[in-house]
Amino acid sequence: MYDKLKKYIFKFDPENMHLAVEKMLMLAQITPMVLESIAKRFCITDERLKQNILGLDFYNPVGLGAGFDKNATMTKGLSSFGFGYIELGTITPKPQDGNPKPRIFRFSNEKSIQNAMGFNNDGAKKVAQRVARIYPFIIPLGINIGKNKITEQEKAIFDYKKLIGSFKELGDYFAINLSSPNTPNLRDLQNEEFVRELFTQLKKQTNKPIFLKISPDMEIDYMLKVCECAIKNGADGIIATNTTTNYTLLKDAKDFGGISGEALKNRSREVFTILSEHFFNKTILISIGGISDGNEAYERIKLGASLVQIYTGMIFEGPSICKNINEVILERLEEDGFKHISEALGKGLH
Ligand SMILES: Cc1cc2nc3c(=O)[nH]c(=O)nc-3n(C[C@H](O)[C@H](O)[C@H](O)COP(=O)(O)O)c2cc1C
């Protein structure tokens, strides 16, 4: 059904389509019966998928990655499609428009996206007001935060501190975004000195879990040092990865923005594997990047991902993606003789 619909949907500009989906979900949200019927069709409840991680209850391991619901306008609607958790944002202290349009490009044959959004969002105050209306929520909510484009590098830490302050009572975990390629020089903040200072300060502000979301483009030894430093200074986990700026991965790629989806899959898995070889059992690891089916999700779990996230997969596979992924995870657990997802965790590591 979605395959047929896709032919029509994909004729439209990706950002306009995203806005149309947002409008539809906002409409659906004011009609609980509609959400209930969607949830009946798409949500899977199974004891084998439930996990308590860092004190949070996840009824399944498949989350929605940051960037889809930047402004917390469609959170209720999205939850009815079966996500185990949703990461909102990236939210910046002040509202900002992001980069000039067009800034999302679809590569249908490659099941990939290239985006240069640049943290377009309504700003902390407005988004916090929206989250306050729904929080505590039926599933865990992550708050993904980033600096404003106009904030000087030397003052970046104050943006993150302000954001933690704004969302202190809202959301269940924080994700620190230093890895978007679309805010000039943001990725330069992925260095030990900044990360040490950042986590030391943020951990004094909140007891909620704080994750670091990393780029797939760092040199491996450097990436391990940055992650080690984050963990030593209080990070509760790592989310790997954001989009890539390796434009050779996609024929006809633009020379700006970040690539996600199928073209990112191998690099993202590779980075995750190395990360897990070093930090599995020492911290919580969340895998994202090119996951669009249950086999890939299960593989990441076996590589040590307590949770996975999807974004681009949803564009190409449609609204049943969570259900499909969770069904395959259950099948694979059974094949491997595991009674619970926790038994599969890290079993694929050498
Ligand atoms: C259009 C678009 C916007 C995104 N915006 C954000 C964002 O605001 N913050 C963030 O941390 N990641 C953002 N991402 C990155 C995704 O969360 C994810 O890390 C990346 O796309 C890789 O996963 P995927 O292959 O499943 O899409 C965005 C991705 C896309 C495609």
Image: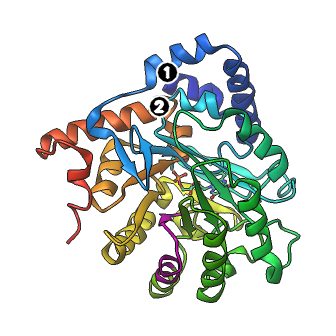
Give the SS element for disc 1. helix
Instruction: Name the quadrant containing residue 250.
Output: bottom right
Left or right of 37? Residue 11 is right
| Residue segment shown in magenta | 227-241
* Residue under label 2: 82
Going 42% across and 42% down the picture, which residue do you hit? Answer: 58
In the rendered image, residue 228 lying in the magenta stretch gets the answer: yes
9 and 78: which is toward the camera? 78
Going 30% across and 49% down the picture, which residue do you hit? Answer: 298
Left or right of 313? Residue 346 is left
98 and 231: which is toward the camera? 231
Left or right of 66? Residue 41 is left
> Which percent across, then down, holds residue 148?
82, 65
Examine the rendered structure and indicate whether residue 111 appears above or below residue 168.
above
| Residue neighbourhood size for the residue with mark 2, other residues' Cα within 10 Å, grouped as few (<14), some (14–19), many (≥20) | many
Mark sitting earlier along the chain (1/2): 1
* Contact flag, marks 1 and 2 (Cβ < 8 Å): yes
- Does any portion of residue 265 appear in the rendered image? no
Name the residue furthest top.
Answer: 33
The numbered mark at residue 39 is 1
> Which percent across, then down, holds residue 65?
56, 49
Q: Amino acid at mark 2?
A: Gly
- Does any portion of residue 200 appear in the rendered image? yes
